[in-house]
Image (cartoon, rainbow, N blue to C red):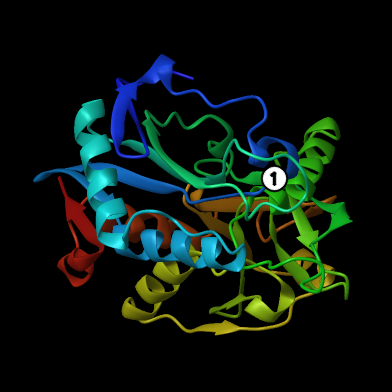
Amino acid sequence: MKESRRIWMDGRLVPFQDAKVHVLTHALHYSTAVFDGIRYYNTREGPAIFRLEDHVERLFRSAKMYSMKIRHTRRQVRDAIIDTVRACGLKEGYIRPLAYYGYGEMGLTPTRNKVDLSISCWPWKMGESKAGKFSGARCMVSSWVRIDPRAQPIQAKVAANYSSAALARIEASENGYDEAIILNTDGRVAEGCVENIFVCRDGSILTPPLSTGCLDGITRDSVTRIAEADGMDVAEYDLYRDDLYVADEVFMTGTVAEIRSVTQVDRARIGTGRMGRITKGLQKSFANVVAGRDSRFGQWLTVI
C-alpha cells in the first residue's frame, strides 16, 4: 500500500504512520467493526467524492445494527471525510471510514467500550479489480455460501461478514479464477465476494433481490438507475447457477469493481466469451457519471 499523508482519527488528522490502535482493541479480537468504501474521482472541477451522503448514511445504519454509538454526527463525519481527502492531496482514490469498538474491557460484550472512528484514504490501483475491466473475469461458484440472515445482520458492512467472502476469494484464487460467486443457503445466486451481480438475458438486465442476502450496494443502485435512464429494463429476479451459464452477459458491480465483466463461470463460457455490448455501454456511462460528464447524475458528486 502506498501511504498517504494523513489519517483522521477521532477528530484529529495524524501522520499516516502514527495511526495506531492498541493490540487489545475489541474489534481486533471479535470483528466488532463496521466500515464503508467510497471512491473519489478526478473531474474537470477537481476531486469529487461519489455518493458521499449515501455512504455516510450506510455507515451509521451498519453501526446501529451493532449498537454502536458513533460520537460524531453525520454532518461531522461527512466533513471529516472531506478534510481527510484534502489533507491527503490526491486527485482520486479510495476512502475507508471505520467505526469500531476500541480498547477498554476485554470479553465478548462490546458495548462497555467506546466507539472509535477513523477515516483513511489512499491511491487506488486497479490491481485485483483489473480482471473484468477489459478482457472479462473468470469466476467460479464457491463452495462457501452467503451468511444466513438469521445468524447476523447481512445488510451491515461489518468486518465479521467478510470472513466468509475472504474464504471464497482464497478458494477462487487457488483454483485459478479471478473471483468467486456466492450462493445462499437456498442455492440462489447472492453476490460476488465484494460485488453485486447482474445477468443480461434477451435484452433485459436481472439482478438478485435483497432477499437472497446480497448487500444493498450503492454501486448496484447507481448502475440500475443509470441503465434505466439509458432506456434499459432492470428487474430483481431469483437467479440460480444455471442462469449464469446460459446468460447472454454477466457483470458485477461494486465500489472497487465499478462494473466488471464476467466471461466465464466455472467451465461455462458466457455469451461469446467476450465483454458484451450492454456491459461495455454501462461501463462507459458509469465512467461519464463519476467523471462529472453526465449532468443527469451531477447530484451524486461532492466536489472538493
Q: With respect to residue 232, does 198 lie above or below?
A: above
Foreground: 14 or 159? 14
Q: Quadrant of the C terminus?
A: top left
Q: In the current view of this chain or complex, which residue is farthest to the left?
A: 45
Q: Residue at x 29, y 32 (%)?
A: 12
Side (left or right) of 195 relative to 247: left
Foreground: 118 or 37? 118
Q: Residue at x 87, y 72 (%)?
A: 187
Q: Residue at x 28, y 29 (%)?
A: 13
Q: Position of residue 116 (x, y in %)?
A: 47, 43
Q: Position of residue 19 (x, y in %)?
A: 44, 23
Foreground: 70 or 40? 70
Q: In this orientation, does residue 3 appear?
A: no
Side (left or right) of 122 relative to 167: left
Q: Position of residue 99 (x, y in %)?
A: 50, 48
Quickly name the residue at label 1.
Answer: 31
The three-letter code of the residue at mark 1 reads Ser
Q: In this orientation, does residue 221 appear?
A: yes
Q: With respect to residue 124, does 112 lie above or below?
A: below
Q: Position of residue 202 (x, y in %)?
A: 60, 80
Q: How many marks?
A: 1
Q: With respect to residue 258, does 69 lie above or below?
A: below
